[in-house]
Image (cartoon, rainbow, N blue to C red):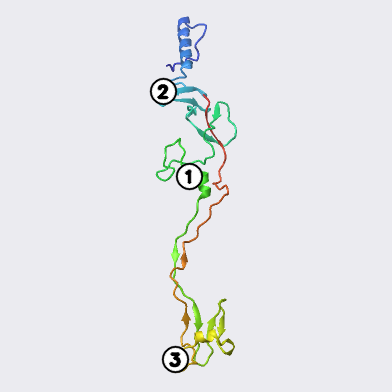
Amino acid sequence: MSQTYTANCYQSDHVAVTDMANIEANFATLRSTNSGAAAPANTEAGLQWWDTVNNRLKIRDDANATWLGVLQGDASLKIWVYRNDTCDGWTIDATVTDRVLALKGAGGLYNANGGTNAGESWANLKAHTHTGPSHSHSHNHQVYNYTDHDTTGQYYNSAGVATNLGNTTWGSNWHIAQQNVAGDPDRIVGADMYSALDATAGGTGATGAQSTADVRPQAAIGTLQYPDL
């Protein structure tokens, strides 16, 4: 490793052996890309330096004010790119397809190692159902409407319409509503009448049928790429 570079490595009045030594040092510096634990002392815009502490190639910016790190990686470095083709030096990983992107989390389906696939398949997402809470209630239905002793009572027909009990409805309907009260055989029943209490009425809540549509989150489509080494 060398970071010694002499700009004026040749001049007619120089000692030849000194110039040759400087030239050799310059070549060594170029060959090692100024590698070293610390930055080179004499910097220029565009100067390269291999940082041996961070194992990284750096280049001096155009203003010769700071070092810029160069993106690097091996074939395991895979980056999502918003394009359908590649730039030079990269290749598309065709082994991972039809997925959304997720950040590794502390819990749930995405609590998995980076570089692996996790989560429900599209088929399962399309086939799922929604089940609401179960509920039940008890109720009955009024079948006879009591009015008073002098007013015609009413029964409810199959359509749920209140129908007067009177001369035009004598017969089975009349006898149903008739009750012998206090020796008065013509007295109408003196109270509303209801059906038996139905304690089984209710339901299990709304349940959605499975969908055959291709439902998935909206996503920006790209490719997974890595350095083509």
Q: Are marks 3 and 2 in contact (CB under 8 Å)?
A: no
Q: Which mark is residue 18?
A: none
- From mark 2 to mark 1, how far is it between C-alphas? 44 Å
Query: Can you say whether 106 is above or below 154 in the image?
Result: above
- The x, y position of residue 204, in whole percent, is 46, 61
User: Going 46% across and 66% down the picture, which residue do you hit?
Assistant: 202
Q: Which mark lies nearer to you, 3 or 2?
A: 3
**Nearer to me, 169 or 96:** 169
Query: Can you say whether 177 is above or below 199 in the image?
Result: below
User: Which residue does the numbered mark 2 point to in the structure image?
Assistant: 52
User: Going 39% across and 25% down the picture, which residue do you hit?
Assistant: 53
Q: How many marks?
A: 3
User: Which residue does the numbered mark 3 point to in the structure image?
Assistant: 181
User: Going 57% across and 26% down the picture, which residue do you hit?
Assistant: 88
- The x, y position of residue 76, in whole percent, is 47, 29
Query: Can you say whether 226 is above or below 17 in the image?
Result: below
User: Which residue does the numbered mark 1 point to in the structure image?
Assistant: 120
- Within 10 Å of the Cα at label 2, are there few (<14), some (14-19), or many (20+) other Cα atoms? some
Q: Which mark lies nearer to you, 3 or 1?
A: 3
Q: Amino acid at mark 1?
A: Glu
Query: Which one is earlier in the sequence, the residue at label 3 or at label 2?
Result: 2
